[in-house]
Image (cartoon, helix red, strand yellow):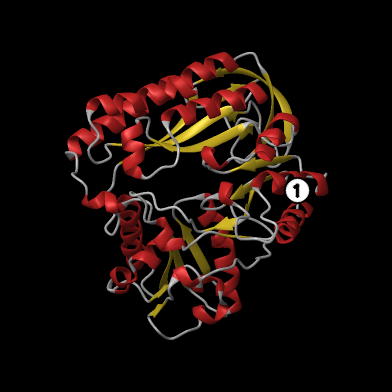
């Protein structure tokens, strides 16, 4: 039985690809290629279409099924491709019945979905660390973002179900778990007693003593609860690495994005967390060239890298997504957008090099991955001097770097 899943986009998609593989197998499908798509940018959609066409040329007899966020938001577009056999919605992909349906489009209104169903998976193919989905959807409506229309409103997995999945993966040998979702700091708002993310983190660490490392995926700093900050301060198994959804450094642009934090909020949050956990490292998402962004506004995003002490930057050239308010705002020339993205990346690379310089000679605990690479607790890649079995945690002394990854003796 051949079921291949091509994953685009985020860690959440990587987790859900394992669920998809199980559901497709339960439907007794064979010679199928599933495209688990991403809709966060127009480029992500374009890449998915490109891969679909290539797979059809390379495997003319295979059935191509498209699912994921782009399938939910652009179902007719994908269904209209002659290479595509079926389009399955973001909720339907979790049902074996949808995989055996005869309709070309199997999709419902994602906004009507109110709960999350638990999924029992044993591994994440190709990954040394395992992802556990604790939340899906988003209740916020940032003006640039199409994802709520692909994922629906926010809904959370009850703590008992999260714990069961973590325990299952740890029993299968995983040393590190990454909690993931669309808006994980919004976790619990829809559940009885409204448990917050910090309480969930403490619940996991208390009840899974064999879990060596717990990591968080991207968070919204304005939603971080006091329990989560306390856990960062006193739980060494909670990794000192936070990836922040900042998006911009200018208050007017943040307002036009319909973000809920200010520039001062972002800086204060980073200062507070660094006081609680001095070895913490921050990454962040920043959009370059948002509509109406002037040069002085953009310079505040550049300055935010230093003011927040950002080390790992994900830069997104603004991509207008049809159906979002930002797509109707006055757009900036694409050459300006690309240039601002380049300048952000260059400053981010310089910040990363400064951090790596300071790491030389430091002793760090790392989790070995494949091909001689390991990750520090701060999620920095390390080239090991000799191969180590993936999943092993060891202490190494850092001896140098190449501007992107460290090396160890």
In the visual, does 266 lie left or right of 96?
left
Residue 152: x and y, percent? 46, 63
Front-lying residue, 369 or 315: 315
Residue at 35% of width from left, 32% of height from top?
251
Q: Residue at x 66, y 29 (%)?
A: 386
Q: Quadrant of the C terminus?
A: top right
Q: Nearer the viewer, residue 314 or 251?
A: 251
Q: Where on the picture, by quarter, is residue 364?
A: top right
Question: Residue under circle 1?
Answer: 204
Side of 209 where 351 appears, left or right: left
- From the viewer's perspective, is residue 319 above or below residue 278? below
Q: Residues within 10 Å of mark 1 (few under 14, many from 20)?
A: some
Observer able to see residue 89: no
Where 152 falls versus 11 (above or below)?
A: below
Q: Is residue 251 left or right of residue 7?
A: left
Q: Secondary structure at mark 1?
A: helix
Looking at the image, which residue sits at the far bottom? 102
**Residue at screen point 40% across, 67% down:** 72
Decide which of 351, 376 is in the foreground and name it. 351
| Residue 243: percent from left, percent from top | 53, 37
Q: Position of residue 118 (x, y in %)?
A: 66, 66
Placement of the N terminus among the 4 image quadrants: bottom right
Residue 76 image position (x, y, % from top left): 30, 72
Is residue 409 in view? yes
Residue at image location 50% in from the left, 70% down from the top: 91
Residue 284, compared with residue 272, is above or below; it is below
């Amino acid at each position: 039985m051949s079921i291949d899943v091509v994953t685009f986009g985020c860690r959440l998609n990587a987790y859900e690809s394992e669920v998809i593989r199980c559901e497709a197998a339960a439907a007794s499908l064979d010679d199928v290629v599933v495209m688990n798509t991403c809709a966060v940018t127009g480029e992500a959609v374009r890449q998915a279409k490109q891969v679909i066409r290539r797979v059809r040329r390379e495997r003319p007899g295979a059935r191509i099924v498209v699912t994921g966020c782009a399938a939910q938001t652009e179902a007719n577009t994908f269904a209209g491709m002659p290479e595509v056999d079926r389009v399955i919605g973001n909720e339907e992909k979790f049902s074996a019945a949808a995989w055996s349906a005869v309709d070309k489009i199997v999709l419902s209104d994602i906004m009507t979905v109110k709960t999350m169903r638990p999924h029992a998976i044993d591994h994440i193919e190709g990954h040394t660390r395992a992802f556990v989905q604790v939340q899906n959807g988003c209740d916020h409506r940032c003006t640039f973002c199409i994802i709520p229309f692909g994922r629906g409103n926010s809904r959370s997995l009850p703590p008992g179900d999260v714990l069961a999945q973590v325990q299952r993966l740890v029993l299968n040998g995983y040393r590190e778990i990454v909690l993931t979702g669309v808006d994980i700091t919004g976790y619990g708002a829809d559940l009885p007693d409204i448990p917050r993310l910090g309480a969930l983190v403490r619940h996991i660490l208390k009840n899974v003593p064999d879990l060596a490392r717990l990591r968080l995926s991207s968070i919204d700093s304005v939603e971080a609860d006091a329990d989560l900050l306390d856990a960062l301060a006193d739980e060494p198994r909670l990794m000192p690495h936070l990836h922040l959804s900042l998006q911009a450094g200018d208050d007017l642009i943040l307002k036009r994005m319909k973000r809920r934090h200010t520039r001062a909020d972002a800086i204060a949050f980073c200062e507070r967390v660094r006081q609680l956990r001095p070895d913490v490292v921050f990454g962040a998402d920043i959009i370059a060239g948002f509509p109406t962004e002037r040069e002085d506004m953009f310079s505040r995003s550049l300055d935010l890298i230093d003011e927040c002490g950002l080390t790992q930057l994900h830069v997104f050239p603004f991509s207008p997504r049809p159906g979002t308010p930002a797509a109707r705002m006055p757009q900036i020339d694409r050459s300006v957008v690309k240039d601002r993205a380049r300048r952000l990346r260059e400053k981010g690379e310089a910040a990363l090099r400064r951090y790596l310089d300071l790491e030389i000679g430091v002793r760090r605990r790392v989790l070995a991955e494949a091909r001689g690479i390991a990750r520090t607790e701060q999620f920095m890649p390390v080239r090991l001097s000799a191969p180590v079995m993936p999943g092993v945690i060891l202490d190494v002394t850092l001896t140098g770097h190449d501007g992107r990854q460290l090396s160890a003796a």
